[in-house]
Image (cartoon, rainbow, N blue to C red):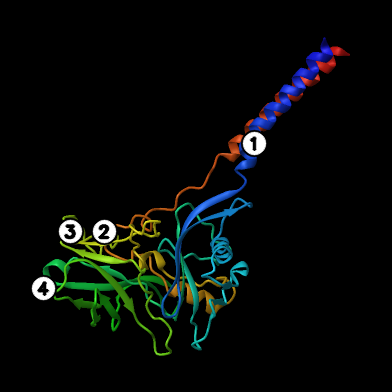
Amino acid sequence: MKSVLKKTVCAAASALLLVMAAPFAASADAQLQVALRVEGVDGNIYYETINVSDSDGDITAADALVFADKQSDKLEIKGAETGYITEVNGETAGKFGGYDGWYYSVNGEVPSVGVNDYKLSENDSLTLYYGGFPCQIPYAVTDKLESDGVIAFKSNDVEYDENWNAKNVTNPVTDASVTVGSETFTTDKNGEIKLDLDKLSGELSVQIDKKDASGAPAVLRFAPDFTVTLGSTDSDSDSAESDPDKTTDSDTKTTDSDKPSDTDSDKEASSSSSSSSSSSSQTASTASTVKSSTTTTTASAATASVSASSAAPAATGDGRTYIALAVFGVAAVVITVMLLLKKKSE
């Protein structure tokens, strides 16, 4: 009788351990949805939402880039595994002879580490782009668009003084070529353009471009589907410069989303979610550290509300710690019962 009882307890304990350990084992494979955009020297290369899996439990920016490279015939990325991206689709870092190269940002913020050390969270927006040094990350200020036809383009940059003390500075994006709908403008000393409201209405595509003296991009382009809309009934009285993530005109709306949707109905607030950081390891050299630190912005790409980029990264905890504690607790109880049975039988 005691032998049968002992075998029954052992079998039940084994089954219970397997049942409780199953979700723990299954959760070992992490999977995240990430919005990925890649901008080359002269145009967009890649713009997709991807589901990245990794058996190590943590998914880095490098993991997402490697995953996209393997899954898509649109991308060929070299160096993501090592944290220093040297080439994307044949566009090699340093081709313009300066500090130009491949940079990255996550949710409009500049990581202080290389792509292989930055851990992503669910619904993060990752942007890899080729830029010169420095490269501005523009956002559109539209509070005067409906009344005066004016759009201002600004960039929140990190600059350093002679003692290498960092400070955030808002700068106008000057002498940039801006296309609104079918018309092209050049930003003035205030970073502004003036539209003819008699000719323009409805949803308008907006794109920006500027090269430095060497030919490298000096301004990050907006996402391919970035737009502003005239005549919207939305209302928001917040100031564009105090909160660039919000629409600033009662009749003007910028439409954006930090990730593309399968139906293309969501619009990305491009450059805000695409601020810059060197794709190389930030500790590789003083030059690479300076590059990644000075070409940055924490602002939104537009003055509209930003559905993904303005939100804090989502937590990635999955309860595996609690499952493990439960499994160990059950195991301890089972072992205690078995020892008592054994002692009693002796």
Residue neighbourhood size for the residue with mark 1, other residues' Cα within 10 Å, grouped as few (<14), some (14–19), many (≥20): few
Asked whether 231 or 171 is in front, the reply is 231
Q: Nearer the viewer, mark 2 or mark 1?
A: 1
Q: Residue at x 55, y 71 (%)?
A: 282
Relative to residue 329, is residue 108 depicted above or below? below
Distance from Cα at disc 1 to Cα at disc 3:
51 Å
For marks 2 and 3, the one nearer the N-term is 3
Relative to residue 42, is residue 338 depicted above or below? above
Q: Which residue is mark 1?
A: 22
For marks 3 and 4, the one nearer the N-term is 4
Q: For the residue labelled by badge 3, is the local secondary structure a helix, a strand or a loop?
A: loop
Relative to residue 230, is residue 11 depicted above or below? above
Quadrant of residue 205 in the image?
bottom left
Q: Residue at x 42, y 63 (%)?
A: 109
Q: Nearer the viewer, mark 2 or mark 3?
A: 3
Say whether marks 2 and 1 touch (CB < 8 Å): no
Q: Residue 198, labelled with which disc?
A: 4
Distance from Cα at disc 4 to Cα at disc 1:
65 Å
Please name the amino acid that badge 2 sits on: Lys
Q: Which residue is mark 3?
A: 232
Residue neighbourhood size for the residue with mark 2, other residues' Cα within 10 Å, grouped as few (<14), some (14–19), many (≥20): many
Distance from Cα at disc 4 to Cα at disc 2:
26 Å
Q: Which residue is mark 2?
A: 246
Distance from Cα at disc 2 to Cα at disc 1:
45 Å
Q: For the residue labelled by badge 2, is the local secondary structure a helix, a strand or a loop?
A: loop
For marks 2 and 1, the one nearer the N-term is 1
Quadrant of residue 246 in the image?
bottom left
Residue neighbourhood size for the residue with mark 4, other residues' Cα within 10 Å, grouped as few (<14), some (14–19), many (≥20): few
Please name the amino acid that badge 4 sits on: Asp
Q: For the residue labelled by badge 1, is the local secondary structure a helix, a strand or a loop?
A: helix
Quadrant of residue 105 in the image?
bottom left
Please name the amino acid that badge 3 sits on: Ser
